[in-house]
Amino acid sequence: MRSPVIAQPPEEVSGSKRLAYRYRRHLGERFIETLLFLMAFASVAITIAIVAMLVKESFIFFEHVSLWDFLTDTQWTPLFDDAHYGILPLVSGTVVSSAVALLVAIPLGTITAIYLSEFAPFGVREAAKPFLELLGGVPTVVYGYFALLFVTPLLQKILPELPGFSLLSAGLVMGIMIIPYVSSMAEDAMRAVPMNLREGSYAMGATRFQTAIRVVMPAAFSGIAAAYILGISRAVGETMVVAVAAGMQPNLTWNPMEPAATITAYIVQVSLGDLPHGSIGYQTIFAAGLTLLLLTLTFNIIGHFLRKRYREVY
Amino acid sequence: MREDKGLSEIRNIIARHKLWDLIFMIIGVLALMIAVLTFMALFSHMLIEGLPRLSWDFFTSFPSRRPGSAGILSAWVGTTLVMLVTAVAAVPMGIGAGIYLEEYAPKNLITEIIEINVTNLAGVPSIIYGLLALGLFVHQLGFGQSILSAGLALALLILPVVIVATREAIRAIPVVIREGAYALGATKWQTVSDHLLPYSAAGILTGVIIGLARAIGETAPIITIGALTFIAFLPPSPVQPEFPFLSFEWLMAPFTVMPIQMFNWISRPEEAFQVNAAAAGLVLVVMTLTMNALAIYLRYRMRKNIKW
């Protein structure tokens, strides 16, 4: 938007011309500012659209199915003749696969973060950080393939009774997939802790390990908690790994050795079929989506408050 | 005598604590190794399974019922076109929003809402964007299960990535640059377009590349839109021999993309199709890793070169 007029005002400027020129210039600036504001506001519009769309379709769904049935029925068979609409089996699949993933991602992510931030020599850190970032860039469907055709056969050698689809192998791979998210955010938080806190600790005779655990980690608590929350919401919303490796049969179970569907896997399963727009089956995926959004939103809000509550000011 | 005993006790304590340091070092390296080894296993498994299947024919054939003659032609063409739509939609929007939030936004409630919202959007599961696209683009706006719907869905998904990258790149430019421009009589937009945007271009580009790399691998939102998995034709060409030479019919065409093609092959029971899946996955991984590596390299160069 370079305008040569502005750089070189006309030589003989009468008062009115000058005013008109300034007015044009002002108008152009206002126009651009409004345009940029609209672009920024688009993100809010997207959120409103997401919520409106999910709520609208779920509203029609809940005219057919009572909220009580939705929350307490133990079967989820919307596509059968004997249709049941209990979200519990999908929630249990989501909870179990996420729990397995977090049992892997949180300890390993935390240890990796502490190691990289407090222990690793400069060279190791410079090499490991981009590598972890690459690990986070691998498409999730590829991780799904890896879980189904590499990890599951491997696990079956140790646990012969493990079925071909299981929450365990999906969760394990999902956990490894989430490590980079957790570790990079936790590491950033720990590195933001000012050096003089560490120096104070060393001066008192503490070792590196003691300093890391008792000084740096508590000081970076809010950031580390936010990293965990991000990991949880990743695990809950992850789709392709579970859709490929955990099977797509809704199954009310708390046993990771069984196959089961998660909320996300159910949405994929329905989308693969050809459900007509406006049918009850079509609306179920929006109701499932709304449940998922509420779950992740809860975690995001908890994360937000944790950050606020424990924010250390240096 | 007594002092010696105390001294040796202290030495013992110190040794014990140093041992803990060492133990943790080893645990840390092991934890890092688990991530590294998993990645190695993943990559080498795909390489072993998929590489023999990669040939020129694999890139120039349509999917087929016979695994031996199936290829990824419609998939990579679809991915390219969808990415084109995504980039055209997300890049200007994201950069514009980033500029607004960094340079224009007054400190008020609306700005705060936008900021919190961008953070929250980044945490929304990708499949939710697919549901939005299904309801809004496919049905309400009538775009159908087309390249346009898919491209827009992915654009919404990567919008926060572009916004955050733009903001960080612009924020890194020192205030003196802006003050210099204003002192010479530049308007706000002249300052932005002549100074801030060129200086932050590399940083923004890094964010755009990372966003697009993520979009290439995204499967869930595109499945939700209802992309077909068996496409044995190409969308109409954007360049036509007759006037007006450009056609936008391809925007409305049905399509498939690489990750969907791969997913389709994984879910077949025949082992031969799973070899195809490995080959397609290998292509996909190489594509996304190259893009990510490019972004990492760009950022590294930037950090080395720029000294304000």
Image (spheres, coloured by chain):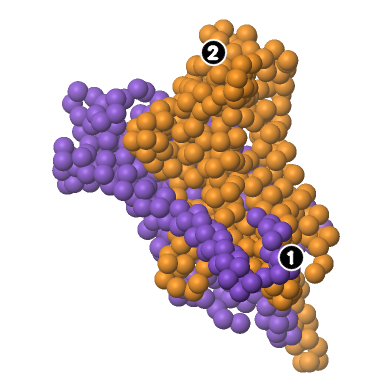
Chain colours: A purple, B orange
Q: Residue at x 73, y 73 (%)?
A: B184
Distance between the alpha carbons at the discs numbered 2 and 1: 59 Å
Secondary structure of residue under mark 1? loop
Q: Nearer the viewer, residue A144 or A289?
A: A289
Q: Residue at x 40, y 36 (%)?
A: B137
x and y percentages locating residue B191 in the rendered image = 68, 65
x and y percentages locating residue B193 in the rendered image = 67, 59
The residue at which mark 1 appears reads as A8
Packing grade of label 1 (10 A; few <14, some 14-19, many >=20) is: few
B207 shown above or below B133:
below
Q: Nearer the viewer, residue B243 or A41?
A: B243
Packing grade of label 2 (10 A; few <14, some 14-19, many >=20) is: some
The residue at which mark 2 appears reads as B232
- Would residue A97 be found to the left or right of residue B69 on screen? left
Task: Examine the rendering and report whether any part of residue B149 can be seen.
Answer: yes
Q: Residue at x 73, y 15 (%)?
A: B56
Q: Residue furthest bottom?
A: B2
x and y percentages locating residue A98 in the rendered image = 45, 47
In front: mark 2 or mark 1? 1
